[in-house]
Image (cartoon, grey):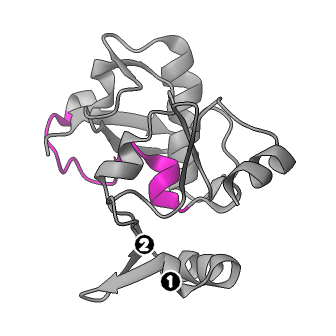
Amino acid sequence: MRFIPWRYVADWKCIGCGDCCRLYSVVINFHEWLRIVKNYGVENTGSDLGKLFIGRRSDGSCAFLNSFANVCQCGLQHMKPRACQLWPFKILREPKFGYPEEATYLFGDSKVFVYADPMCNGLRFGAPTLEFAGSVLKEFVEIAAGLRSNQFKTTSSIWLSQPYYRSIFR
């Protein structure tokens, strides 16, 4: 997988395609695993080589991927694991994927390196817009730093009301 520096991304918006939930396994920490198990049962999780992860359906998709009228939505939206909150971005302390100048993001007194997974269909490539650089990306970095848990700009704007959502997918 070749990640690209954030400065090559003009904008990002989740389009609800669900590809991330079909193509990638999500490693979770113990606290996230415990919340999922308490709410949905251990059968919706897995473990391998000392790692915990969200379970997969027989078709390979995430156990919590819901689809209705070709729009996908996360069934864990209210308690989404950090890896899912941050996707398609990687926020790192070191420039692991190269291009340190283009990946550098200044956050307060700190410098982090931000990369994007180009497989995401919600990425638009080019020079970063002011909204993306100053608002969307900032929210991703705040989530990575543990300063924020609620998502506003870093999740799908496609949503269903909670009661309606529960009646369809349960």
**Residue receiving disc 2:** 55
- The answer, for residue 147, to whether it is visible in the render is no
| Mark toward the start of the polypeptide (1 vs 2) | 1
The 10 Å Cα crowd at callout 1, few under 14, some 14 to 19, many 20 or more, is few
The 10 Å Cα crowd at callout 2, few under 14, some 14 to 19, many 20 or more, is many
Q: Give the range drawn in magenta.
A: 81-100
Q: What residue type is labelled 2?
A: Gly
How many discs mark residues in the rendered view? 2
Q: Is residue 97 left or right of residue 15?
A: left
**Residue receiving disc 1:** 43
From this view, report whether residue 112 is shown above or below residue 156: below
From this view, report whether residue 34 is shown above or below residue 104: below
Nearest the viewer among 70 and 20 is: 70
Residue 165 magenta-drawn?
no
Quadrant where the image shows the C terminus: bottom right
Q: In this view, does 101 lie to the left or right of 133?
A: left
